[in-house]
Image: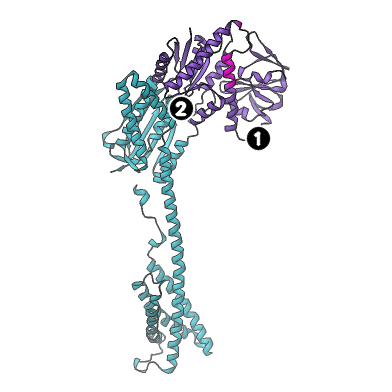
Chain colours: A cyan, B purple
Amino acid sequence: MQILTAPLPLPSARPWRLRRFANDLGLTIVFCSWAAVLIQLAVGDPQHLYQQMVYSNCIGLIAMLILDGVRLLFVPHLVSGRRWLLPYALLLIITAPVAHYCGIVIGGTILGEGWTPLSKYPNANQFYMILFTLCAIAFMSLIFVNRERVERLKVDRLEARARAEAIERQALQAQLRLLQAQIEPHMLFNTLANLQGLIAIDPERASTMLDHLISFLRATLSVSRAETTQLGQEFAAIEAYLGLMAVRMGERLRYRCMLPDALRAARLPTMLLQPLVENAIIHGLEPHVDGGEIVVEAALDAGRLLIKVSDTGLGLGDQDAHGRSAKGGGVGVATTRERLQALYGADARLDLVPGQPRGAVALLTLPLESA
Amino acid sequence: MTTALIAEDEPILAATLARTLQKLWPALQLAGTAPNGIKAVEQALELRPDILFLDIKMPGQTGLEAAEELAERWDGARPFPQVVFVTAYDDYAVQAFEHAAVDYVLKPVNEARLARTVERLRARVDARSGASTGAGADLDAGLATLVEQMRGLLQQVPAAGSGQAPHLDVIRAAVGNVIRMIPVQDVLFFQALDKYVNVATLDGDALIRLSLKELHAQLDAVQFCLIGRSCIVNMRHVASATRDDFGKLQLALRGRPEKLKVSPLFAHLFRQM
């Protein structure tokens, strides 16, 4: 089933590189501003805080551009692994003077203070600042990596949960399918009893009935292997079932199955239709003294598959003389609705309405899927 | 001449059972076949067979319900038929049958097994025809057996079904536009009427829309007893129980003139201490 195996929408599908870069950028600006404050307090020159801020941010942003650029482009999943430690340390050592020099050049230009030509770089004072820059960007990298690790863990957990849920859902589907494919022992033994009788009375009809039984069993028992089936096959299985029931119930059961040739190849989940037909028999016609007719028809309705199972039996609300509701607890209907919900969401529905003048009508609407 | 009636909704199964019986017991005459639980009772009352095969799962009503109704409506002028239940594989029913020692035949019919049943039935029918000259026993053997078996079955039902629902204290019944509040102690009896239950009190009747079985599950089982398929009586308001000429029990009530018939299945409730 296509729907079941579709990839799950996970958070990691977003453009994570861009997002991470933006995050790091913000963090860098905050970090550099704090560094500037720290430096000015240490130097004891708070009047020039603005200038220091400009320099700090210029240096920091350039360092970040280099580091994040290398990281995000070449080692997207660097988070773990000691083998990246040495190359990264080297990168830091190279980045520190480069970022520092470029930073003071750009900062100087912005502030109009002029800048040190490369030939006089670095002087003793600047050497300490390079060291400071090295410490600062190393610290910054540590924060980045840590943040990423935490995020990664979160995503992993979400993914694991989504996967577990998907597996659970599939298991539930399989379970519901099997539940609906159960052959009622009562039905089977009654059918065998009829066969036993027919062999003596009318061997030819017995043989036909055996054919029906084989088709019915094959369709019902193969359900655990396939998730979808063609409407043509499903109708064949239903006709086999109704054929069996018609032999058993004699004149009390009449039936018609109408399937347009164009819909023969339409796909639908297995064991979706048959329980509805069985319900019509078990709850509608079998307990009805006079029996009645069952009509199964498929049609195309505005691009959707519409399947109608109508019977002229006891009906939905009717109670017999002893207060039992003819439709029982509606377990079969509830299971079918649950399956539809899980398979198609709001795209499919099952309606159960009273028939006219009596009986019940089950209306199944599905998206049309062709093989 | 021994006669049999087969109640079975599936024509081929009815024919098969008839054929097999014919083979095992050529002297047995088939009086008829009934296609559903309602016809089964009607035909049994009309044809008065010696043996009655009742399918459990039939339209109209089940074989068990048919047996219950027949026991209630049998007039006692002739001996009650020997009842044999027929069922397809069904876990619960078969277990219950075994437990209550009910006569039953499984579908598909096994000839050897049916032969044993036929033997037992023959012995009982013979014993009855020998003893029938001394009629006047208040319960004939066929009915006594059925009552015994059905009681065995009925006792198992509540254990399987009802939870411990709180007892009903007050019945809310509509009389015209008014809702009458009737304390259950004041109710003399409940009588099922189609889709309603009639609540009979000293100051008149009222209807409630509830099935008798649902109602019974909500009443104190010691004080309120089922005495048939359609009646629950409040034991505190029963004045006396009388047997009529056919050995059928009738209850007289304190404060109301009605006589209530007791099904043979519940006659044991009114035996002297």
Same subunit, tags 2 and 1: no
Q: Is residue A364 left or right of residue B37?
A: left
Helix, strand or loop under label 2: loop
Residue A178 is situated, as x and y percent measured from the top left of the image, at: 41, 40
**Of residues B147 and B230, which is closer to you in this image?**
B147
Kindly indicate the quadrant of the structure image that contains residue A247.
top left
Q: Secondary structure at mark 1?
A: loop
Q: Is residue A56 above or below residue A321?
A: below
Residue name at image x 59 percent, y 10 percent: B76
Protein chain holding label 1: B
Span of residues in magenta: B134-148
Query: Looking at the picture, how far across and down is residue A19, in whole percent?
Result: 40, 68
- For disc 2, the chain is A
Depth check: give the residue in front, A157 or A362. A157
- Determine which of the numbered discs, if any, sits on residue A315 in the image: 2
In the figure, is residue A43 to the left or right of B110? right
Asked whether residue A73 is in view, the answer is: yes
Q: Position of residue B6 (x, y in %)?
A: 46, 16
Q: Residue under label 1, please give it.
A: B166
Residue B218 sits in quarter: top right
Question: Gap between marks 2 and 1, in whole Å?
Answer: 32 Å
Q: Residue at x 32, y 29 (%)?
A: A212
* Rendered location of residue B94, percent (x, y): 50, 28
Figure quadrant of the C terminus of chain A:
top left
Q: Residues within 10 Å of mark 2 (few under 14, many from 20)?
A: many
Rendered position, A266 above or below A4: above
| Nearer mark to the viewer, of 2 and 1 | 1
Query: Does A230 sit left or right of B45 as displayed?
Result: left
